Structures are given as C-alpha cells and as structure tokens.
Amino acid sequence: MEPEEEPGGAAVREVYEEAGVKGKLGRLLGIFENQDRKHRTYVYVLTVTEILEDWEDSVNIGRKREWFKVEDAIKVLQCHKPVHAEYLEKLKLSCSPTNGNSVVPPLPDSNSLYVTSAQTSGLPSTVR
C-alpha cells in the first residue's frame, strides 16, 4: 500500500498494475494476519469490467496473466501458498465469484477468478 492509501484502493491499483485487469471492487472477503511476519492482508472480490491486452508490468517485466477456475486455483495454491488457498476456500463457501451480481463480464471462462490482495506490514499505521 502507498502512504495514505486505503486497502480497497490498493487492491484495485495492484490488480490493474500486476494483471492488467480493471474492475469494480466488491465486498471484503476477509483480513488475514501473519503475526510472525507482521503482515496484514485484505482480500476482496473484484468484478472484472475490462481486461487489457498489454499493461505496464507485461511490457516492462514480461509479467503474464493466467485465469483459473476456483477449484484449480485452490489446488495450485495448496502446494505453494496454503494460506492463500484458504482465502479461496472461504470465498467458495461464502458466496459466488460474481459477488451477488447477476451478470458476469466475459472472461476467458465465466467460472474463472483472479485474486489480488493489499498487504500492510508492522503496525496498522505503517504501510508498504
């Protein structure tokens, strides 16, 4: 997070910068803390409204974007980032990826989901 930036704004900015995706911020799925690393992660639902072909990180550092069905993303994350898999398990149990909206924007697969988070470290007033 940037100084003076709210977690929701940081999440929207990060998904745009890192994945070339724009959207409408949905509900806060949860706030997860790692006391050992002094991190707090805010996880949101984002309804995608636009998918860019080229974006800053794709041009500058060759970042790639990949879409996963929720179940497939959970399997991948369980091997490498089990805490992140828990975020998706919670989403799967609590609501649909559409965040209650009746229309899903066209994605590579309408059952796909992209997840981003805004993270803070240290005390709540300290951000990065």
Image (tube, grey):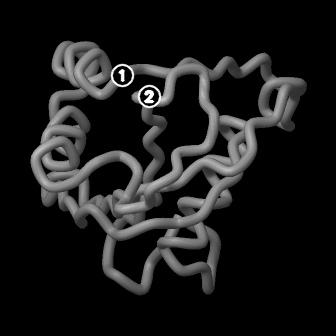
> With respect to residue 114, does 127 lie above or below?
below
**N-term-proximal mark, 2 vs 1:** 1
- Above or below, 104 against 123 in this view is above
Around disc 2, counting alpha carbons within 10 Å, would you say few (fewer than 14), some (14 to 19), or many (20 or more)? some
Quarter of the image for residue 83 reads top left
Circle 1 residue: 69
Check disc 2 and give the amino acid type: Ser
User: Foreground residue, 41 or 50?
Assistant: 50
Name the residue tied to disc 2: 112
Residue drawn 53% across the image and 80% down it: 6
Q: In this view, does 91 lie to the left or right of 98?
A: left
Q: Is mark 2 on a helix, strand or loop?
A: strand
Examine the image and state in which quarter residue 111 appears. Answer: top left
User: Helix, strand or loop at disc 1?
Assistant: strand
Mark 2 → mark 1, Cα distance in angstroms:
4 Å
Q: Are marks 2 and 1 in contact (CB under 8 Å)?
A: yes
Residue drawn where x is 74% and y is 45% of the image = 50
Taking the spot 60% from the left edge, 72% from the top edge, the residue there is 9
What residue type is disc 1 on? Lys
Q: Quadrant of residue 54?
A: top right
Residue in the foreground of this view, choosing between 33 and 104:
104
Image location of residue 46, percent across then percent down: 50, 55
Image quarter hosting the N terminus: bottom right
